[in-house]
Amino acid sequence: MNWLSPTSILLAAILAVYWQAAFPMLRSVLGAQPDLLPGLMVYAALRSRIQTMVLLSFVGGLGQDALSANPLGISVLPLFALGLAIYAKRDLIVKDQLFAQSVLGLAVSFLNPILCLLLLLSLGKHPLLGWGTLWQIAIMTIVGSIVTPIWFELFRWLEGALGPSHTTESSFRPDREIRRGRA
C-alpha cells in the first residue's frame, strides 16, 4: 500500500461530499439526497488500512455534517462503526464479486441513515420523521447499492493508471540453449 490509495480515498470523500451539496439535481428528481459515502466506506474497509478508514469516517462525516443541517460530528460515528464491522470480517468477504459489493453497499447505505437518526433522537434532537423518511432511506439504499461497485471499479482503474506497473520476470531467457540427452 502506497500513499496513492489513502490520498485518493480521502480526495474522493471530499469530492463526493462536495458533489452532493453542489449539484442538487438528483435530489430534486428522486425526492431524496443519495449518499455516496457509505459505498466509499465499504471500499475503504475492504481495501485499505484501518487508519485510512478512520480518516475517511472523520473527513467524510465532518464534511457531510458541515454542509447539511446535521449537528457537527453526528455522521462520523455511524460511518466508523459500519466500516469497522466490515473491516473486522474482511477476510471472510469476497471482495472482487459485484454481487458482494452491491449487497454490502445496500446494507451500509441502509444502516447509516438509521444509525444517524438514532443518534439524533438519543441526543434529544427532533428530526422530521414520516412516510417521506422511508422513501428517502429507500432511495439512499438503492443508490448506495449501485454506487458501491462503481467505487471499486473507479479505484481499480485509478490504481492501474497511476500506480506502479508490475512486471513479472521469468527465469527463462529466450537466448538460452537447452541441452537434452547424454552429454
Image (cartoon, rainbow, N blue to C red):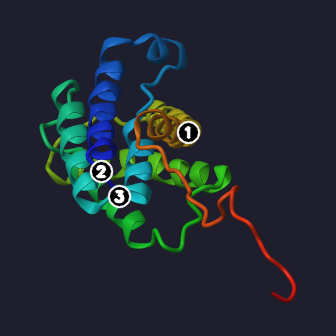
Judge whether 8 appears above or below 108 on screen.
Answer: above
Residue 97, located in which quarter of the rendered image? bottom right
- Element class at badge 3: helix
Residue 18, located in which quarter of the rendered image? top left
Q: Tell me the number on the disc at residue 2.
A: 2
Q: Amino acid at mark 1?
A: Glu
Q: Badge 3 is on which residue?
A: 83
Judge whether 94 appears above or below 24 on screen.
Answer: below
Depth check: give the residue in front, 59 or 4: 4
Q: Position of residue 79 (x, y in %)?
A: 30, 51
- Element class at badge 2: loop
Q: Can residue 116 be seen at all in this image of the molecule?
A: yes
Q: Badge 1 is on which residue?
A: 153
- Of labels 3 and 2, earlier in sequence is 2
Q: Amino acid at mark 3?
A: Gly
Judge whether 64 appears above or below 183 on screen.
Answer: above
* Residue drawn at x 20%, y 24% as measured from the top left: 67
- For the residues labelled 3 and 2, the Cα–Cα distance comes to 21 Å
- Of labels 3 and 1, earlier in sequence is 3
* Residue drawn at x 60%, y 67% as measured from the top left: 171
Depth check: give the residue in front, 162 or 85: 162
Q: Position of residue 138 (x, y in %)?
A: 54, 38
In the rendered image, the residue lying farthest to the bottom is 182
Q: Amino acid at mark 2?
A: Asn
Q: Nearer the viewer, mark 3 or mark 1?
A: 1
